[in-house]
Amino acid sequence: MKVKRYFRKNWQLWIMLLPAMLYILIFCYVPMYGIQLAFRDYDFTKGITGGAWAGLKYFKQYFDSPMFWVTLKNTFVIAFASIVVGFPIPIILAMVINQLKNKKWKRTVQTTVYIPYFISVVVMVSILRIMLADGTGVIDGFLKSLHLVGENVNLMGSEKAFMPVYVLSGVWQTMGWNSIIFIAALSSVDTQLYDACKMDGANRWQTMIHVDLPAILPTIMIILILNMGNILNVGFDKVFLMQNSLNLGASQVISTYVYTVGIKSTQFSFGAAVGLFNTLINFVFLVVTNQLSKKVTGTGLM
């Protein structure tokens, strides 16, 4: 009776949620049926469920392959650097924007930092290739003129330069968009706290540290937990477009390796096993980060 009464009272909300629930069911849960491909010898003539059961054969094959540590290290380094460098910047940007009092100037700054997010990945990588072209690129010439980069370094073809270029370009493109949720969280801060800071003689930086940061700390922890759940999900499209034979040692990540061996080499079972391993590692990071967050800050996803 309680369930019927609940649905009778809130049926409009469930109807609004229905499209999202159907989307998740169709595109997230139904494809999980294909996970068994990682445990079978795939046969075109027999379909996903028709191949012989192989157990952990393809997982062992990946663990024993020379590409295991290479892809795992590259993926983790790029993902970890993206979080360490890219996660705090939107928070700082949101607090700085929140301190702007001139509404017109504030809207101008927000629009300016949001625009890069709407540049497609293909266009973004094309811009990088032009700006960082060896000998002709504007940024390449600027960095070499300041002796920050060696004269013989090709930024788009160097293994050492791949990770910084990937991370910094990603931060520039997404920091404005990622700051939106923190700006929204700051809008709920009690204005009396700002007045109290002024009465105590606090400057803007002290206000940001002692009022803004504690106010959005729960939001920060939730976003961090979600990011840690995707720590090994380095974007395939951008890495693949930036990848070339010169930087392959630093740019071959799990997602591009799955494409190479699973799609191009038609080793579908092996590719599925590698992809499933990647997902399991992400799940472990998500659970561990969530538990640590609940113990340290009292904030978690569940």
Image (cartoon, rainbow, N blue to C red):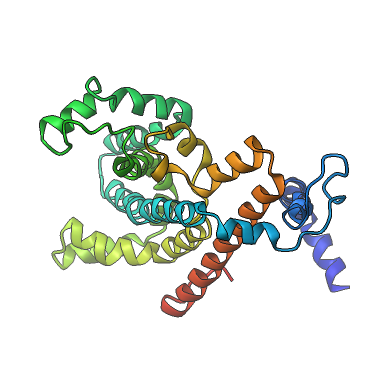
Up the image or down, 261 lies above or below 129; here it is: below
Left or right of 58, for residue 231: left
Of 195 and 287, nearer the camera is 287
Number of numbered markers: 0
- For residue 120, say whether it is visible: no
Of 36 and 102, nearer the camera is 36
> The N terminus is located in which quarter?
bottom right
Residue 68 on image: x %, y %: 51, 55
Outermost bottom residue:
295
> The C terminus is located in which quarter?
bottom right
Residue 230 on image: x %, y %: 52, 55
At 87% across and 66% down in the image, what residue appears? 4
Residue 220 on image: x %, y %: 41, 61
Splitting the image into 4 quarters, where does residue 281 fall? bottom right
At 59% across and 45% down in the image, what residue appears? 258
Up the image or down, 131 lies above or below 174; here it is: above
- For residue 284, say whether it is visible: yes
At 65% across and 42% down in the image, what residue appears? 262
Splitting the image into 4 quarters, where does residue 83 fall? bottom left
Of 134 and 126, nearer the camera is 134
Residue 101 on image: x %, y %: 25, 44
Left or right of 82, for residue 131: left
Up the image or down, 251 lies above or below 5; here it is: above
Of 177 and 119, nearer the camera is 119
Left or right of 134, for residue 258: right
Outermost top residue:
136
